Amino acid sequence: MTTESPSNHQNLELQSTQELLEGINGEDQQVAHAVKAVIPAIEALVDAILPAMRKGGRLFYIGAGTSGRLGIVDASECPPTFGVDHGVVVGLMAGGDQAIRKAVEDAEDDDQLAWQDLTAHGIGPNDCLIGIAASGRTPYVIGGLKQARETGLVTGAIVCNADSKVAATAAYPIEAIVGPEFITGSTRMKAGTAQKLILNMISTSLMIQMGHVEGNKMVDMQLSNAKLIERGTAMVMESTQLQQKEAKALLLKMGSVRKAVEAYHNS
């Protein structure tokens, strides 16, 4: 497996800080190229998911360790960024939420656990599932994908080894081969970065096509802090004839940039 291949760098403990940083950065530069190579596979998965989500379906991510945490991060960022309800994109990981900070022993080796987790969330016919596993061999992910596919759900996978069991189990596999890690086997590095980039691409392209972006602006973003209120106010000012004070007041009254601009033009 590529993810377990020996590092191209030796005697790391003898290197200076600059040497270590330059070595890590040099390896990281390969990641974007690996992701670019799989854009057709990402496109196929997004295009399969989009019709289901337009029918009210949800997107689930499952994974273990770093892969599971990355799915949770992407899912948790969709509500504040795009204004969708919590639960439209859901990240689940082996061992549950307690495993976000501390590994739960043997959880990822249970091939029945993911489907139990998904069933607890009421997974249904319009929902979609993406399994995330750098190695491509995590039983938690394989079991969840297998049962989801047998049920007729859209299934995808993000892996960093070729010809893996996880990829074979999903209908729409994405195999981002990033090469050996800087530290041998440390898939939190290049593999994790590739997975994060791909998750960004999937969720962002879905949310844009579902209408949560206008032009290039997050018109449905949640106004959860002062920075976002300031950004939203500027967007309202740009789309109306209002000055800063009036634009901010309208934004706060309506709750989103989209609603504020619509209210202005309908008044």
Image (cartoon, rainbow, N blue to C red):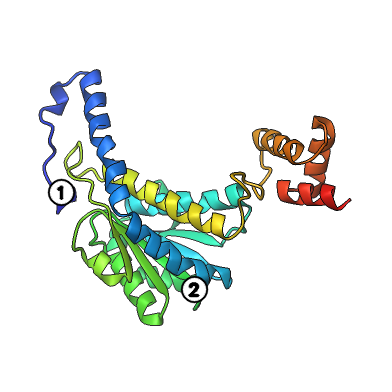
Give the residue at x 16% y 21%. Answer: 15
Q: In terms of depth relative to the viewer, which is nearer, 149 or 115?
A: 149
Classify 10 Å Cα crowding around label 2: few (below 14), some (14-19), many (20 and above): some
- Specify the amino acid type for callout 1: Glu
Q: In terms of depth relative to the viewer, which is nearer, 138 or 181?
A: 181
Report the disc number at residue 4: 1
Report the disc number at residue 123: 2
Q: In terms of depth relative to the viewer, which is nearer, 98 or 67?
A: 67
Q: Earlier in the sequence, mark 1 or mark 2?
A: 1
Pick out the residue farthest to the right. Answer: 267
Q: CA distance from mark 1 to mark 2?
A: 34 Å
Where residue 129 sits in the image (x, y, percent)? 42, 67
Give the residue at x 79% y 49%. Answer: 254
> Does residue 49 appear to the left or right of 54 in the view shown?
left
Say if residue 112 shows up in the picture.
no
- Specify the amino acid type for callout 2: Ile
Indicate the quadrant where residue 114 lies.
bottom left
- Secondary structure under tag 1 reads helix
- Secondary structure under tag 2 reads loop
